[in-house]
Image: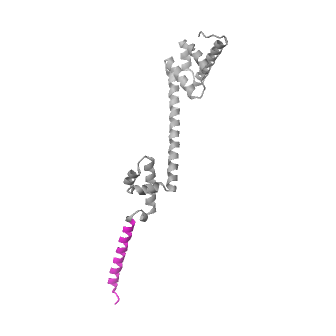
Amino acid sequence: MPLEPSSRAEVLKRQRTKARRQMAAKMNKGPKHRMMAEVEFRKDMAIILKIAGYTHEQIGASIGESKQTIFNWLHEPKIEAKFEALTQTLTESALSLLQTYTIEAVQSIVVIMRTSNNDKFVMEAAKEILDRGGIPKASRSISESTSKSETEITDTTLLEKIRKATPEVQEQAALAIEQLENLLSQHSESNGDTSS
């Protein structure tokens, strides 16, 4: 017996409702049935949390997955490659930041060298800059002899003039002082002067 139009509409409506419920149940059932974009997003979150040092259990609790699922995801070749790339990028960024702060540290030492009224601080700052600049220290025998007879500049007007000079002139003065120290050191060695 054929169904009347209103009955057919009612049957179709029930079939559509049933199909929607089944589809919704499949979509919410597990990772197999989730939309791929959502799974990829969760995998990316797992990578970020792993880089931050979270355990598999903590990552799983954060994104609503089991510990085993997180373990499996993080051992997929594609995910491992993403993890390595992000780790490398972070390392390069950290090195870049460190280099930036190194430049600021050297600038701070230069400011101390140029503005301090204490000769000891000026000389220490100059030594730090020379050490960091890669200028090799003198050999132990030369450094021992010069440490005993270090050149002291006692003319305060000369020191004031050096401090007020342009950076280029200050560098030339530092080189001249270094050359003078080397000359005196060589002279004392050639004369066999061990009393200094």
Residue occupying image coordinates x 50% and y 30%: 105
The image shows residue 106, relative to residue 94, as above or below, that is above
Q: Position of residue 24 (x, y in %)?
A: 37, 68
Q: Position of residue 160 (x, y in %)?
A: 53, 16
Question: Start and end of the magenta stretch?
Answer: 1-27
| Residue 68 placement: quadrant | bottom left
Which sits in the foreground, 52 or 57?
57
Colouring style:
one colour
Q: Position of residue 74 (x, y in %)?
A: 46, 54
Residue occupying image coordinates x 37% and y 74%: 19
As drawn, which residue projects farthest toward the top? 195
The image shows residue 167, relative to residue 102, as above or below, that is above
Where is the N terminus found, in terms of image quarters?
A: bottom left
Residue 184 lies within the magenta run: no
Residue 4 lies within the magenta run: yes
Majority SS type along the magenta span: helix
As drawn, which residue projects farthest toward the bottom? 1
| Residue 159 placement: quadrant | top right
Which sits in the foreground, 62 or 6?
62
Which sits in the foreground, 151 or 79?
79
Residue occupying image coordinates x 63% and y 14%: 184
Where is the C terminus found, in terms of image quarters?
A: top right
Left or right side of 14 for 83: right
Q: Position of residue 32 (x, y in %)?
A: 43, 64
Which sits in the foreground, 57 or 128?
57
Residue occupying image coordinates x 55% and y 26%: 129
Please give the count of numbered marks on the rendered protein: 0
